[in-house]
Amino acid sequence: MSLATSSESTSTMATKLETKPNIPASPPPALEEKAVEPSPKSESALKSFISGGVGGACFLLVGHPLDLVKVRMQTASAVAATSSNSVFGMLSNTLRKEGVRGLYRGVSAPLTAVSPMFAVSFWSYDIGQRMVKAYGQRGLTEEEKSLQSYSLSMKEMCMAGAISAIPTTGITAPTERIKCLLQVQGDLVEKGGKAKYSGMTDCAKQVLKEGGIQSLYKGTVATLARDIPSAVAYFGTYELIKRELTKLQPNNKKGDLSVGAVLTAGGLAGMACWTVGIPADVIKSRFQTAPEGKYSGIVDVYRSLIKEEGYAGLFRGLRPALIRAFPANAACFLGMEVTKNALGFMD
């Protein structure tokens, strides 16, 4: 090919390029504007703490008489358990012999700790939700986290419930130890026995004097073994039923529940909690109220119980626990939700 021919070709190409219509460069594609819901603002941890405390007080006022019956049934031997020791039989006997005060025997210990216990429980559940959410959003930038609407799955809700049981047990274990001792003592006094403790403070002093802080926290492992699966069932059931009931309420854009829905969800959550936790609770009650040295540990309690009463013994006290669970936990969650709405300004 000659240089002249090459020059002509180059000239022709240049002419074509010049005559090509001048198409302005299109701007870079703009990001499509999507209606992104911002991540919901986290609730105040202090609000969860206060509302949980109010819920705990409501729980105790409604549920303690049946808790008294539950503990007495659990700590009674199979021989002593008769038809006269039915739930309503024990309630009527206690009311007849001791009056209304007898129904609230041992209430001082949980009254001192139940509000803080539930306060810590709901606060821990709130913290657990934040921990699970943070794990689910790992790897995202702060901007992405603020724009992403993140809803916890039921599995994550249950995990948060399990987390809530750990700090709560620190309050529950010594409280339940004193409560159970006072309740069993009341049963002995009814049968003509002599009272060893004059009250909650005296009971705590004697327990500390006899075995120190270790004795006060006797049954902590059993309490934790009860509370972790129970908390999973408790909060998991409440959140599940709450979600389903919210869908059934027409024109409910905010997701608020009616009073009836809160009572239903709370009551069923309480029943699920005790259905799961009652075997460990029986072992805990036996271990905490037994004389020092009777059992080497909770495994020994379990073996002794199965040998003497069979597996049915693990569910002793389930009936009063379930009868108590619905109204007591319905009152708890209602008190919690009402208080949380009243403290909405704290978010």
Image (cartoon, rainbow, N blue to C red):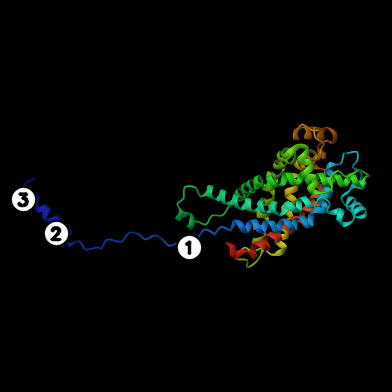
On-image quarter of the C terminus: bottom right
The local secondary structure at tag 3 comes to helix
As drawn, the label of residue 35 is: 1
Viewer-nearest residue: 241 or 110? 110
Q: Judge whether 128 appears above or below 40 on screen.
A: above
* Upstream in sequence: badge 2 or badge 3: 3
Q: Amino acid at mark 1?
A: Ala
Task: Determine the residue positioned at 51% across, 50% down.
Answer: 137
Circle 3 sits on which residue?
Answer: 4
**Dot 2 corresponds to which residue?**
15
Tell whether 81 sits left or right of 126.
right
Q: Position of residue 49 (x, y in %)?
A: 64, 56
> SS for tag 2?
helix
Asked whether residue 330 is in view, the answer is no
Q: Does residue 1 appear in this view?
A: yes
Quadrant of the snapshot with the N terminus: top left
Q: Measuring 89% from the left and 50% from the top, which residue is drawn there? A: 90
Circle nearer the N terminus (1, 2): 2
